[in-house]
């Protein structure tokens, strides 16, 4: 089927939906300049996730066990790309689908906050959010503004590069409730994911699911499409390099989300005759 027909097909599923949910991965942020994990040249080509220390990297840093150089390099790279990253047309298209009252929630594996900055308000971040800190003493969570996060990130990268553990701990000890040391509220390898119950309920209750820019390699998040299918939803996948859920999807479009989602939304508005002319 031609791309145009696939776009029309996807728009008709979305237009008829009463409860649309989007499930997204790193591919959605690729056009914002944030590298994906498994594409050639992606983050896992250049960093070994196990060398980053997984979830206990933070406890090991705060217990003075030292800071792996890989972690310093990874955090420095992530801060640099995130500081430049802005929502792209794919994020804004999802924000528009929410404003149109069609998209009920976004379940994302991304930690870059771009779905919120693109206009979505109901965002379930199963791998956490880098803009949020979690106190390691009392569990209190603090949302940081962009400037605050990047200033803190730059200072952290400098302190880590110097191996100044004391400085790192002092910088991190900013819990407004108890003054305890805070860590980024992101899920490290080996740690439990966040809000998975909520995410699975969204998959269960939706009647259509958009699968956007994910290789579907990481569980339990990758159960979402299967769960939605099992409970009767129609599935539309958009991925730049192929179809990663061939046995599940009703429509699979090979393309960039920033290029495919906007024409789909325009088509949906025509179908819903939101256009006044
Ligand atoms: N538009 C659509 N798809 C894209 C684009 C784009 N512009 N650019 C890349 N892609 C696709 C790639 O083809 C790939 O299939 O996005 C997918 C990204 O896959 P991964 O890099 O594996 O990222 P993701 O699926 O989000 O990984 C899940 O793995 O390491 C963990 O915690 C990490 O949340 C991450 C999880």
Image: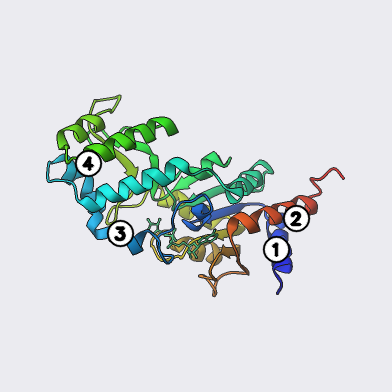
State the separation of the CA atoms marked 2 and 4.
49 Å
Left or right placement of residue 4 versus residue 170 in this view: right
Q: Is residue 161 above or below residue 191?
A: above
Front residue of this view, candidates 70 and 217: 70
Asked if the residue at tag 3 contacts the one at tag 2, i.e. Cβ–Cβ closer than 8 Å, the answer is no
Label 2 vs label 3, nearer the camera: 3
Asked if the residue at tag 2 contacts the one at tag 1, i.e. Cβ–Cβ closer than 8 Å, the answer is yes
Front residue of this view, candidates 112 and 69: 69
Do we see residue 145 in this rendering? Answer: no
Task: Name the quadrant of the C terminus.
Answer: top right
SS assignment at label 4: helix
State the separation of the CA atoms marked 2 and 3.
41 Å
SS assignment at label 3: loop
SS assignment at label 1: helix
Label 1 sits on residue: 7
**x%, y% of residue 258?**
60, 54
Q: Earlier in the sequence, mark 2 or mark 4?
A: 4
Label 2 sits on residue: 267
Left or right placement of residue 148 versus residue 87 in this view: left
State the separation of the CA atoms marked 4 and 1.
47 Å
Q: Earlier in the sequence, mark 2 or mark 3?
A: 3
Tag on residue 47? 3
Do we see residue 78 in this rendering? Answer: yes
Number of residues whose C-alpha sits closer than 10 Å to that of mark 4, classed few (under 14), some (14–19) or many (20 or more): many
Cβ of mark 4 under 8 A from ligand 1: no
Label 4 sits on residue: 160
Q: Earlier in the sequence, mark 4 or mark 1?
A: 1
Residue sitting at x 68%, y 62%: 10
């Amino acid at each position: 089927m031609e791309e145009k027909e696939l776009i029309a097909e996807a728009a008709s599923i979305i237009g008829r939906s009463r409860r649309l949910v989007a499930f997204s991965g790193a591919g959605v942020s690729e056009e914002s300049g944030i590298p994906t994990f498994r594409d050639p040249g992606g983050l896992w080509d250049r960093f070994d996730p196990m060398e980053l220390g997984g979830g206990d990297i933070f406890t090991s840093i705060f217990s003075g066990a030292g800071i792996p150089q890989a972690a310093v390099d990874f955090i420095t790279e992530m801060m640099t790309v995130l500081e430049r990253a802005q929502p792209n047309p794919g994020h804004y298209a999802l924000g528009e689908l929410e404003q149109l009252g069609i998209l009920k929630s976004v379940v994302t594996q991304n930690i870059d906050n771009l779905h919120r900055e693109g206009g979505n308000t109901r965002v379930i971040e199963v791998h956490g959010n880098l803009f949020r800190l979690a106190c390691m003493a009392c569990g209190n969570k603090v949302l940081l503004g962009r400037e605050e996060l990047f200033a803190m990130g730059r200072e952290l990268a400098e302190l880590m590069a110097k191996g100044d553990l004391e400085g790192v701990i002092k910088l991190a000890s900013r819990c407004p409730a108890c003054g305890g040391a805070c860590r980024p509220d992101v899920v490290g390898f080996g740690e439990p994911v966040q809000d998975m119950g909520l995410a699975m309920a969204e998959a269960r209750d939706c009647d259509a699911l958009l699968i956007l820019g994910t290789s579907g390699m990481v569980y339990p998040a990758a159960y979402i499409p299967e769960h939605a299918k099992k409970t009767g939803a129609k599935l539309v996948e958009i991925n730049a390099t192929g179809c990663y859920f061939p046995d599940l999807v009703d429509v699979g479009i090979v393309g960039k989300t920033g290029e495919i989602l906007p024409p789909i939304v325009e088509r949906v508005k025509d179908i819903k005759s939101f256009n006044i002319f």
